[in-house]
């Protein structure tokens, strides 16, 4: 079963279940080392060799760092009085097991050590010891190796096929693991919970997807075996704490209790099932009557409810004091104004699940949170979904002229692109014009179909793939349509040229504007940018310098071609989200062309400012945010013209990246799991370190967001920091609006 479970290590990791115990197998006369290796090793089949525990630990270190979805098997040949020789190897395996939940390189496996005496060194809470006693076999190690190789191949094939068939394998896997995680036996030591979940899940998956291989009572045997691992250090009190914690956390999650924050004198009525939360001391104050009620009505591990506070006190879940008192008094005042002492049990956060801790973090944000049916139907952009399935977001109002710059960060696969896909659709359904510049292939039709329902992609998106032999540049960058005065013409053409040239010093910029004043005097309809480039070159000096900078991108545009239309024409053809793919066909001038298009689009918005414009760029790294560039100008002044910039990058802290310094001014910043500098990001968000922020537990789509959140009591947007999940478009009323408008009723949104 260890062998089978190891194939599923990455699947377990996605459910926050990690192999945090080492299996120590004690060889015997009947079950020698080679046979144990044959039973466990599933990474290579060419030999029965495995790395030693010491003194050379490089082979073992390599396997621990590289083996993914498999067993890391090591051998210890030292005698009991030679354990010193294997210390480095033991510590290496211990660190691998205890650090499994913080494994940032995505390598997940199970580990086994074949040794007679390693359990004398390795702590009991980090290992499970398997002794074969009088077990014997008539088969050789080679026979086992070959038979299990065929079994492995069959298992892998079934897993791969199951994952391809519309997620059938994952659905079955998730059903099993969710059931097992909610029914962990109370008597099981906490340190063995993950091992129990992995073994039982592997057993049930095998029995469902293959012919049952194990005896009917194997689950009971596994439970008894794991319980026996720490019997001498598993007191009754630990069982009671586990049992109480299970029921207490369930009541918190089910809404049985009301939550309020502790004050100097807390307003609370006795007997109302109210939890008083003391975030400063990381405690929750529970009425003693509520504790005893859980013990009496829910717990099977106690006969006398009075033993529960004693167990919690012993386990350090209650604060210790000189008198060993289990309950304390807090100053309270009833709803009719009568002060009184409230007797409570001050239960430590240590007993709480992560989800319940997150619930307490939301207590001072009630005015910013909306149930589905409470979400405003006009102007509200949902940005985050909390652990209790409520939403928070920003009210986007035309008259307010507020900044709407969105900056998403996080490592590859953390959910940045998925988040932006949801946001652009929601903005579109709020009435925004949305143009996406795809410079890395993140928003092709094929990829969007994995992020959004098919009917949304078909109805709402128009794809323009710019490149030689593909689509032409969608607008005429030299267009003067809509420019009624010479200053209008100068602004339109200057914005395109400045975008293509990059930074211009003050003197050169002044000379260019002067040149354009003369050149554009009698121009109407459109300017031939190639002719303009020639005239600049003829002007010499500054003109030659500018012509040199833009010649390359103009050559690309000549090869690709362009449509003789304006942004007005493009948007009036059909109201859709425009995806402009700027792929490798555009060559080295990709960013120049992007900047020219963005500069032209923003200039159009300044002249036609009657609604919101949202510009999204899938990758901000290496884009031009220098002073006066289109992107920098939008960040600085976009709010005046109701223009938003939406973009993402892997790292929030990246020395020397000007785009990061500019985008840090965004008023909507979403932090998925960081690619690097996790502690710095956590501290920036107000946490002590990455673990305190919960980054090590983040799944794709988890985020901490800093934004101006709408307060339903004041009617204003206010600065907030909140942890939760990126909002899925189909979970919002905006999806209902989409279905009503476009007549799509095939796939309902999840509420």
Image (spheres, rainbow, N blue to C red):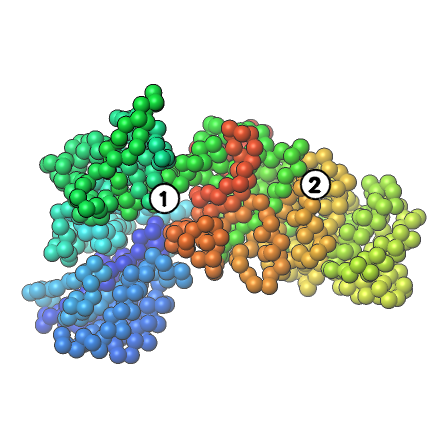
**In the displayed structure image, the side of residue 336 where residue 511 appears, left or right:** right
**In the displayed structure image, the side of residue 623 where residue 293 appears, left or right:** left
Could you tell me which secondary element the residue under label 2 belongs to? helix
**In the displayed structure image, the side of residue 229 where residue 480 appears, left or right:** right
Q: Position of residue 745 (x, y in %)?
A: 51, 31
Q: Position of residue 358 (x, y in %)?
A: 38, 42
| Residue to which mark 2 is pinned | 640
Above or below, 570 relative to 442: above
Residue 395: give its label: none
Q: Position of residue 674 (x, y in %)?
A: 47, 56
Could you tell me which secondary element the residue under label 1 belongs to? loop
Residue 144, by quadrant, is bottom left
Q: Position of residue 424 (x, y in %)?
A: 58, 42
Q: Quick check: marks 2 and 1 in contact, CB under 8 Å?
A: no
**In the displayed structure image, the side of residue 284 where residue 415 appears, left or right:** right
Q: Nearer the viewer, mark 2 or mark 1?
A: 1
Residue 460, by quadrant, is top right
Above or below, 746 relative to 689: above
Inspect this view and state whether residue 54 appears. yes
CA neighbours of label 2 inside 10 A, class few (<14), some (14 to 19), many (20+): some
| Residue to which mark 1 is pinned | 280
Which of 415/236 is in front? 236
Which quarter of the rendered picture does the C terminus lie within?
Answer: top left
């Amino acid at each position: 079963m260890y062998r089978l479970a190891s194939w599923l290590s990455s699947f377990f990791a996605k459910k926050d279940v990690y192999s945090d115990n080492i299996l120590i197998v004690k060889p015997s006369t009947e079950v020698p080392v080679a046979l144990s290796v044959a039973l466990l090793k599933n990474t290579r089949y060419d030999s029965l060799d495995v790395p030693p525990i010491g003194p050379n630990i490089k082979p073992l270190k390599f396997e621990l760092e590289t083996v993914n979805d498999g067993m890391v098997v090591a051998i210890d040949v030292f005698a009991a009085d030679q354990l010193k020789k294997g210390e480095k190897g033991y510590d290496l395996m211990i660190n691998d097991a205890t650090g499994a939940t913080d494994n940032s390189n995505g390598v997940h496996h199970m580990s086994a050590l074949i040794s007679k005496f390693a359990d004398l060194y390795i702590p009991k809470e980090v290992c499970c010891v398997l002794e074969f006693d009088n077990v014997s076999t008539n088969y050789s190690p080679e026979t086992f190796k070959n038979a299990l190789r065929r079994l492995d191949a069959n298992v892998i094939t079934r897993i791969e096929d199951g994952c391809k068939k519309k997620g059938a394998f994952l659905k079955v896997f998730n059903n099993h693991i969710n059931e097992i995680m909610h029914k962990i036996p109370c008597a099981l030591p906490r340190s063995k919970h993950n091992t129990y979940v992995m073994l039982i899940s592997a057993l049930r998956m095998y029995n469902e997807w293959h012919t049952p291989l194990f005896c009917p009572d194997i689950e009971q045997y596994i439970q008894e075996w794991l319980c026996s691992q720490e019997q001498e250090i598993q007191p009754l009190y630990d069982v009671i704490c586990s049992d109480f914690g299970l029921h207490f956390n369930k009541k918190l999650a089910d809404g049985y209790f009301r939550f309020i924050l502790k004050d100097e004198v807390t307003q609370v009525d006795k007997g109302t099932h109210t939890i008083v939360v003391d975030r400063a001391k990381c405690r929750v104050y529970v009425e003693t009557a509520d504790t005893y009620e859980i013990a009496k009505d829910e717990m099977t591990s106690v006969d006398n409810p009075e033993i529960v506070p004693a167990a919690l006190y012993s386990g350090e879940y209650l604060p210790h004091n000189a008198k060993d008192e289990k309950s304390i008094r807090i100053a309270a005042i009833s709803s009719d104004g009568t002060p009184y002492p409230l007797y409570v049990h001050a239960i430590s956060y240590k007993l709480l699940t992560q989800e319940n801790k997150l619930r307490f973090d939301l207590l001072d944000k009630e005015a910013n949170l909306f149930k589905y049916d409470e979400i405003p139907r006009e102007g509200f952009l949902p940005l985050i979904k909390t652990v209790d399935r409520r939403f928070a977001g920003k009210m986007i109002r035309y008259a307010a002229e507020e900044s709407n710059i969105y900056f998403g960060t996080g490592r590859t696969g953390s959910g940045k692109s998925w988040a932006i896909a949801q946001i652009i659709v929601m903005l579109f359904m709020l009435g925004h014009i949305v143009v996406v510049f795809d410079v890395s292939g993140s928003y092709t039709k094929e990829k969007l179909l994995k992020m959004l329902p098919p009917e949304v992609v078909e109805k709402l998106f128009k794809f323009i793939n710019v490149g030689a032999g593909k689509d032409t540049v969608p607008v005429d960058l030299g267009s003067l349509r809509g420019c009624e005065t010479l200053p209008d013409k100068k602004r339109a053409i200057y914005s395109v040229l400045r975008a293509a040239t990059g930074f211009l010093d003050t003197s050169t910029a002044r000379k260019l504007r002067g040149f354009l004043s003369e050149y554009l005097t009698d121009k109407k309809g459109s300017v031939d940018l190639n002719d303009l480039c020639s005239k600049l070159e003829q002007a010499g000096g500054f003109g030659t310098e500018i012509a040199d900078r833009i010649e390359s991108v103009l050559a690309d545009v000549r090869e690709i071609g362009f449509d003789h239309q304006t942004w007005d024409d493009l948007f009036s053809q059909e109201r859709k989200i425009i995806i402009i793919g700027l792929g490798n066909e555009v060559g080295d001038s990709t960013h120049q062309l992007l900047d020219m298009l963005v500069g032209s689009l923003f200039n159009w918005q300044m002249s036609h400012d009657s609604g919101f414009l949202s510009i999204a760029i899938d990758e901000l790294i290496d884009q031009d945010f220098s002073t006066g560039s289109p992107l920098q100008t939008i960040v600085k002044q976009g709010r005046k013209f109701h223009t938003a910039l939406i973009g993402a990058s892997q790292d929030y802290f990246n020395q020397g990246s000007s785009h990061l310094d500019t985008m840090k001014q965004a008023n909507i910043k979403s932090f998925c799991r960081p690619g690097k500098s996790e502690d710095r990001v956590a501290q920036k968000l107000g946490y002590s370190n990455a673990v305190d922020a919960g980054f090590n537990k983040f799944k794709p789509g988890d985020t901490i967001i800093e934004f101006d959140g709408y307060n339903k009591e004041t009617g204003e947007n206010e600065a907030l920091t909140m942890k939760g999940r990126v909002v899925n478009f189909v979970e919002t009323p905006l999806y209902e609006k989409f279905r009503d408008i476009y007549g799509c009723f095939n796939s309902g949104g999840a509420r």
